[in-house]
Image (tube, rainbow, N blue to C red):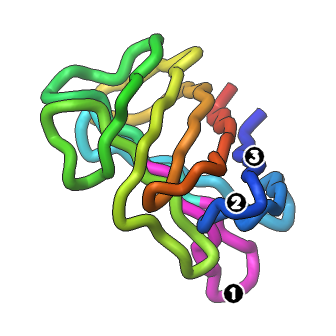
């Protein structure tokens, strides 16, 4: 199925120690790709008008396409361009700097580029913090 979930330590700035699971019908999860090396997931409520609650960006380093594997030492998206990059924000909170990594477990990209299938785990430390936000995203599986 399609879902996004995360947990975080009590001092993590983004998750503030609260767990979250995004599932239909109360939230929608959309994906977009502007290049084969960058995918964006947005979780929105289904109210009218919809409000983006959370956003996850994952990008491979340089012009490399996203493939199965671990992307360690990810920089802050969109600033980092030569190495892998990531950002996870929401709840009116975002990081100015991060230490992060993500692991792509499954990916299929159709022409366009369009995401057909995706499954990954991610971990982010925000603004020099010691508590991590850890999550998982699955799309089109």
What residue lies at 20% left-to-right and 21% top-to-bottom? 64
Residue at the spot of label 3? 5
- Mark 2 vs 1: CB contact within 8 A: no
Height in image: 43 above or below 103? below
Quarter containing the C terminus = top right
Residue at the spot of label 1? 48
What residue lies at 84% left-to-right and 67% top-to-bottom? 26
Locate residue 95, reporting x and y percent.
Answer: 44, 65
| Crowd class of label 2 (few under 14; some 14 to 19; many from 20; radius 10 Å) | some
- Mark 3 vs 1: CB contact within 8 A: no
Of the image marks 2 and 1, the number of the one nearer the N terminus? 2
Q: Over which residues does the magenta segment extend?
A: 43-57
Q: Look at the image and say whether residue 56 sits in the magenta stretch.
A: yes
Q: Predominant secondary structure in magenta?
A: strand
* Left-right relation of 104 to 9: left
Q: Which mark is residue 28?
A: 2
Quarter containing the N terminus = top right
* Left-right relation of 140 to 99: right
């Amino acid at each position: 199925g399609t879902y996004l979930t995360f947990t975080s330590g009590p001092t993590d700035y983004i998750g503030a120690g609260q767990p979250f699971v995004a599932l239909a019908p109360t939230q929608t999860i959309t994906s977009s790709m502007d290049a084969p090396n960058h995918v964006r997931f947005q979780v929105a409520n289904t109210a009218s008008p919809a409000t983006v609650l959370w956003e996850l960006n994952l990008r491979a380093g340089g012009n490399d396409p996203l493939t199965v594997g671990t992307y360690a030492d990810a920089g802050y998206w969109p600033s980092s361009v030569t190495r892998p990059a990531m950002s996870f924000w929401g709840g009116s909170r975002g990081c100015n700097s991060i230490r992060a990594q993500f692991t792509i477990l499954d990916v299929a990209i159709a022409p366009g580029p369009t995401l057909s299938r995706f499954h990954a785990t991610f971990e982010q430390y925000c603004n020099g913090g010691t508590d991590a936000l850890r999550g998982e995203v699955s799309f089109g599986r």
